Amino acid sequence: MQSKISAVLFDMDGLLLDTEQVVLDCFRQTCAGLGLSDMDQVFYQCIGLRRADSRLVLERGLGHLVDLAEFDTSWETRIESRLADNVPVKPGAENLLQQLQDRGIPRVVATSTTSEVAIENLKTAGLYPLITTVLGGEQVENGKPDPEIYLKAAALAGHEPGDCAAFEDSDPGTLAAVRSGALTVQVPDLRPPSAQTLALGHVVADDLYAGALRIGLIAV
């Protein structure tokens, strides 16, 4: 076991919660409803980003094709409807969080999603009681891939970033975690890491549990 890991910092969507596929499905439905097709690349560029930053991506990719306000409203309505009563959880997430809680290791969620929505979704998923605190995208000045959110998450946990492990799924989030100095594990979700991201030299794992084992956070 690596006793130097004093706290664990987690992304949320696509990492603890299996929500990215839901959001992509809703994106595709919204595009189809507005007569758009083959727009997945625009969505993929939004993964891991805060709302304000993903809005810029949407403006570049869709702004010349549709009314973005109409698009946003339709997309968000679909997402809220899908997640209202059932927020799916990634395999191993609950077990890992429970083990860390039992050992008294702080567990901070550092997500690009707003804290209000994050807390609501974590509660619906049943994971919120296992989380120490939530740091949302609106609580930092600079979104991922800037390391600010992980630096603040480590501070909230009461430890230096270098004493923390950070789990991510997206490339922007992984870059943010690596830049913060945390021991970083990437568990890819919808997209594999790019060659540029792989060059960072962090741990890449098939799932949360495998990643935790790789860094000695848990034992078999």
Image (cartoon, rainbow, N blue to C red):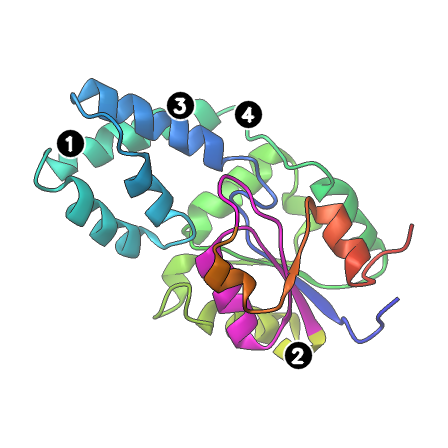
Quadrant into which the N terminus falls: bottom right
The span from disc 2 to disc 4 (Cα, nearest Å) is: 35 Å
Front one among 132 and 193: 193
Q: Which residue position holds label 1? A: 70
Q: Which residue is identified by label 2?
A: 162
Query: Disc 2 or 3, which lies upstream in sequence?
Result: 3
Is 84 on the left-hand or right-hand side of 203? left
Q: Amino acid at mark 2?
A: Gly
Secondary structure found at label 2: helix
Q: Which mark is residue 86?
A: 4
10 Å neighbourhood of mark 2: few (<14), some, or many (≥20)? some
Q: Which residues are magenta?
A: 164-192
Residue 40 in the image: x percent, y percent?
32, 35
Residue sitting at 28 percent across and 56 percent down? Answer: 53
Relative vertical location of residue 126 with respect to residue 110 in this rendering, above or below: above
Looking at the image, tell me whether mark 4 or mark 1 is earlier in sequence order.
Answer: 1
Residue 153 tag number: none
Badge 3: few (under 14), some or many (20 or more) residues near its Cα, within 10 Å? few
Identify which residue is drawn at 44% across, 44% down: 117
Of badges 2 and 4, the one in the foreground is 2
Which residue position holds label 3?
81
Rendering quarter of residue 109: bottom right
Q: Position of residue 177 (x, y in %)?
A: 54, 67
